[in-house]
Amino acid sequence: MTLVVPHMERVIAYVDGFNLYFGLKSKGWRRYYWLNIQMLAQNLLKPNQRLLLTKYFTARIAGPPDKEKRQSTYIEALETLSEFQILYGKYQLNPRQCSHCGFQDEVPNEKMTDVNIAVEILSDAYQDEFDVALLISADSDLVPPVKTVRELFPNKRVVVASPPGRYSIGLVKSASKSFVISRRNIAKSLLPEEIEKADGYIMRCPPLWK
């Protein structure tokens, strides 16, 4: 009797960092900010799938020093992960004026993540780097690249994993399959509270995130 070995699908995860962060924030899940993105992607796979690489898209924030420090610590922690890439967009402050009272302030806005994801997912599809693209986002701006991948490469699938508290009907409809990331999968995908870098430096989860 010949055993049939199931085909192992190659998966690359594309993670919209700010979309995921604001999803967690909207649920009040600060305790999960110290998230191991690589492990989360791994925990979302099926038994016949193999995670080759995780691409994390974010931008360095410009704001209060304590927030910048927390983000820097977190990014340094993520940099210790294997088969993991961080791709940066831009973070800018856009002026805003109240139409009623004339008060002026600045609104933070992250730029280029959707473009960077589109470029990476299309480039990887063209170079046959994956069978399945796992897209962790609920940004409707990603509908065109998802549709393009599916039209040009019908043998490849794009699976959308919506962050908690975030949802895009258009993105879900454009995908081969979709689901919402469960709290259970997030809770079991945290980084250790202390992480030692190659040079011996110890990074710790920010107290505000515990």
Image (cartoon, rainbow, N blue to C red):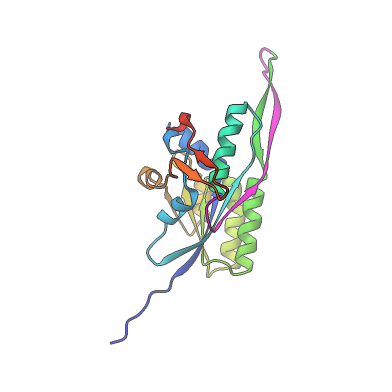
Q: Nearer the viewer, residue 114 or 145?
A: 114
Residue lying farthest to the bottom in this orientation: 1
The magenta-colored residue range is 80-101
Q: Is residue 158 left or right of residue 144?
A: left
Residue furthest front as drawn? 200
x and y percentages locating residue 208 in the rendered image: 47, 29
Residue 132 magenta-drawn? no
Task: Give me the residue at 66% from left, 14% from top.
Answer: 100
Residue beneath the point at 63% across and 67% down: 126
The single residue placed furthest to the top in the displayed view is 101
Q: Is residue 96 magenta?
A: yes
Q: Is residue 9 left or right of residue 88?
A: left
Residue 89 in the image: state x and y as whole percent. Answer: 67, 44
Residue 202 located left or right of residue 186: right
Q: Is residue 124 above or below residue 204?
A: below
| Residue at the image point whose x is 35% and y is 45% from the top | 184
The C terminus appears in which quarter of the rendering? top left
Q: Position of residue 78 (x, y in %)?
A: 54, 47
Q: Vertically, is 14 above or below 94?
A: below
Does residue 52 sit above or below 118 in this rendering? below
Res. 44 in view: no
Quadrant holding the N terminus: bottom left
